[in-house]
């Protein structure tokens, strides 16, 4: 059985950012950092890239620029090989030893679930921030500071092969400008963290092609969600927040009998958000019973004939921050796809493909 490493520093996977008048995506200035378990920085670099995918056939939401608004940050847990995570949002480069893991509840943020940060309470002020995620037996870090949790995670890599009760992974550094960007942001830790017993011949379908227990695929998506809306329709975007879902077409089908399948996004890669502007073809009434609306995936380029997965939106309501009774014309929502590859059942330690529905402008 492989031993659990001390503290993993994930490589960067950050795609998407602000939606601008020219229709391009611009990086959030996120920095990828790797480090030894002692915390000494060994490499750092900046990167940004577009999200890929093409706009859907939904009607535009009007206008060419994003509506202004205060910065909002929604977190969705896409870490696929544990049931829940907690996060330390640490000042970078020097972490605060007194900081406490988020959320405050010892049970953490469940897989596919979402929560909105209180920027004044949950994040350190006026500094770059490095999210560090914890998984495993989260009860072991109840009441502990981030420094104590990190020490516990690092305690399992000794010569005797002692296994720590939790794992930790430090993710990409978010510059302080992200939190004053006046955008509605999504942060989604994704992939698999690995560890003892997280080994299976089929693990790639849940954790990505490069996954092994000793080479985890945990990463971070940070992107901007559109605040554009249409006063008489519901606005939707979709995010591919799974390392196991290759560039894929996403469709939506009303629960009304005889309704056709409408395209939300095509060739949407991991870290992508589409369409831009948001899909605004349907009203609340035209969706029918919201819990029975179908979210479908298709092989890219094969047309909307043979779905590779079919998920009821009821799952997205259960996981996200929006209740089915809260859907309203003139409001915007984002479907965040997390979990395994389409049409793959839950495995020994990974979850099946599912969705979280969050407000585009919480």
Image (cartoon, grey):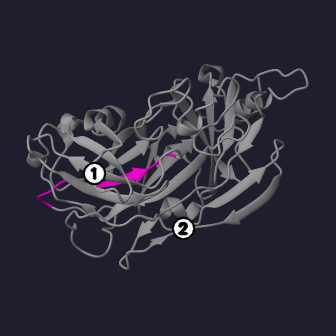
Q: Front-most of 208 and 161?
A: 208
| Marker count (numbered) | 2
Residue 258 picture location, percent across and down: 8, 44
Q: Earlier in the sequence, mark 2 or mark 1?
A: 2
Magenta range: 231-242
Q: Is residue 55 visible?
A: yes
Q: Front-most of 203 and 237?
A: 203
The residue pinned by badge 1 equals 251
Residue 190 picture location, percent across and down: 54, 44
From what the image shows, is residue 45 above or below residue 216? below
Residue 193 picture location, percent across and down: 64, 36
Q: Are marks 2 and 1 in contact (CB under 8 Å)?
A: no
Q: Is residue 361 visible?
A: no
The quadrant of the image that shows the N terminus is: top right
- Residue drawn at point x = 67 percent, y = 58 percent: 32
From what the image shows, is residue 308 above or below residue 14? above
User: Which-is-in-front pick, marks 2 and 1?
Assistant: 1
Residue 227 picture location, percent across and down: 31, 61
Examine the structure image and report whether residue 148 is included in the region drawn in magenta. Answer: no
Residue 70 lies in what quarter of the image? Answer: bottom left
* The disc label shown at residue 49, or none: 2
Disc 2 crowd rating (10 Å Cα; few below 14, some 14-19, many 20+) is some
């Amino acid at each position: 059985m492989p031993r659990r490493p001390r503290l993993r520093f994930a490589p960067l996977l950050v795609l998407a950012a602000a939606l601008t008048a020219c229709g391009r995506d611009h990086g959030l200035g996120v920095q990828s950092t790797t480090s030894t378990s002692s915390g000494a920085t060994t490499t750092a670099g900046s990167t940004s890239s577009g999200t890929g995918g093409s706009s859907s056939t939904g009607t535009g939401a009007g206008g060419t620029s994003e509506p202004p608004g205060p910065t909002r940050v929604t977190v969705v847990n896409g870490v696929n090989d544990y049931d829940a995570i907690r996060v330390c949002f640490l000042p970078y480069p020097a972490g605060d030893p007194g900081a406490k893991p988020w959320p405050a509840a010892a049970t953490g943020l469940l897989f596919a679930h979402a929560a909105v940060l209180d920027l004044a309470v949950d994040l350190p002020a006026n500094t770059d921030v490095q999210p560090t995620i914890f998984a495993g037996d989260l009860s072991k870090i109840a009441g502990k500071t981030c420094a104590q949790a990190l020490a516990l995670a690092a305690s399992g890599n000794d010569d005797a092969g002692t296994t720590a009760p939790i794992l930790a992974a430090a993710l990409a550094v978010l510059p302080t400008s992200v939190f004053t960007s006046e955008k509605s942001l999504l942060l989604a830790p994704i992939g698999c963290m690995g560890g003892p017993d997280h080994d299976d011949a089929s693990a790639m379908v849940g954790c990505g092609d490069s996954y092994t227990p000793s080479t985890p695929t945990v990463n971070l998506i940070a992107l901007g969600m559109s605040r554009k809306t249409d006063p008489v329709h519901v606005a939707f975007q979709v995010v591919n927040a799974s390392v196991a879902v290759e560039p894929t077409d996403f469709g939506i089908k009303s629960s009304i009998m005889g309704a056709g399948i409408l395209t939300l996004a095509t060739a949407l890669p991991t870290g992508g958000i589409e369409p831009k502007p948001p899909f605004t073809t349907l009203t609340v009434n035209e969706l029918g019973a919201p819990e029975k609306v179908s979210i479908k995936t298709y092989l890219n380029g094969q047309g909307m004939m043979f779905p590779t997965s079919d998920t009821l939106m009821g799952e997205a309501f259960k996981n996200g921050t929006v209740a089915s009774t809260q859907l309203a014309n003139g409001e915007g929502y984002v479907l965040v796809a997390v979990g395994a590859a389409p049409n793959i059942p839950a495995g020994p330690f990974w979850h099946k493909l599912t969705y979280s529905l969050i407000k585009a402008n919480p």
